[in-house]
Image (cartoon, rainbow, N blue to C red):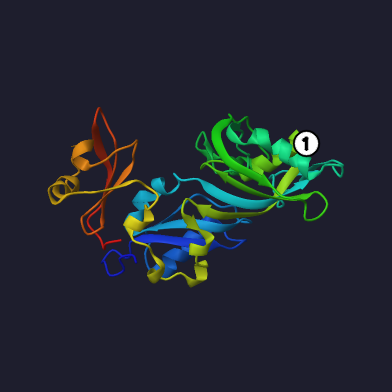
Amino acid sequence: MGRRGAPGGPDGLAVVDKEAGWTSHDVVAKARGLLGTRKVGHSGTLDPDATGVLLLGVGKVTRLLRYLGLPSKTYTGVVVLGRATSTLDASGEVTGTWDMSGVRLADVQAAAEPLTGDILQVPPMVSAIQVDGRRLHQLAREGIEIEREPRPVTVHRFVVDDETEPGHFPIEVTCSSGTYIRSLAADLGTALGGGAHLRDLRRTAIGSFSATDGVPIDDLTPDHLLTPAAALRDVASVTASEEVVVAVGHGKVLEREELGASGPGPWRVLAPDGALLAVYEAHRGTTAKPSVVLAPTDPA
């Protein structure tokens, strides 16, 4: 479990199963009170109406948040055909309606195929992306819409199941970070000759962290925290020798061979007892440099 007795407060990763109605910021604020520390941040915003996995970095793990979004993410939801909304989900105002009663499962599955793989996706206005210092959702609330550049994302899987009620098709999507499931739903409706929006969005996994690992925010205690080493369990790891431990602790640039690192990186560097010492990334030539250096903590 995470380190709980340190003077600066606990260190670790909390896997929260977020309820609907909470913003990601609400969850962070609640966790700060429950864990007794201001050092709490989240990786990967979830919409207020969405539920599911939200990863919270606590203490020193707030410095590792950039690495928690590297793996793929999995979502479930329901695409509602025939009705487009201003937010691309059920919380927005209806902006268009179509009679799409003739659309069948095979049609929806065929339309999903071009939206699978490496694609370019236009971020929705109701997103946290910043343009000229302002977030898109702030502009959207003021009725301002600006042109957004398409961004490359990867949709690894886009599974569509048969409708549960007329025009309501359950989906499951595994994708890269930065993919908007609401946009996929809207694009699916457009591809079928009409419009659509998303409802019941749930994030079921981020990398190897799934909803079954999650705890409701009201139940969160320091005992639920995973160690910093376990927080980065989806990142390639190397175990440093006793000699290399000292160099890593001083943040030295090292030869990858000396570090024992292979592949593109990044690498979590562990002490012989399993504690996380640092995260190293590829550097010039055959070297690697530290991006984050931590003091030794409890073993994983």
- Which residue is found at the position 33% from the left and 41% from the top? 266
Up/down of 278 relative to 124, above or below:
below
**Would you say residue 255 is visible in this rendering?**
no
Indicate the quadrant containing the N terminus: top left, top right, bottom left or bottom right: bottom left
Most extreme residue toward the left is 243
From the viewer's perspective, is 43 left or right of 154? left
Report crowding for label 1: few under 14, some 14 to 19, many 20 or more residues within 10 A (C-alpha): some
Query: Dot 1 lies on which element?
Result: loop
- Which residue is found at the position 81% from the left and 43% from the top? 104
Q: Nearer the viewer, residue 282 or 88?
A: 282
Q: Kindly identify the amino acid type of the residue bearing the numbered disc 1.
A: Leu
Residue linked to disc 1: 192
Indicate the quadrant containing the C terminus: top left, top right, bottom left or bottom right: bottom left
**Would you say residue 106 is visible in this rendering?**
yes
Q: Nearer the viewer, residue 249 or 28?
A: 249
Most extreme residue toward the front is 106
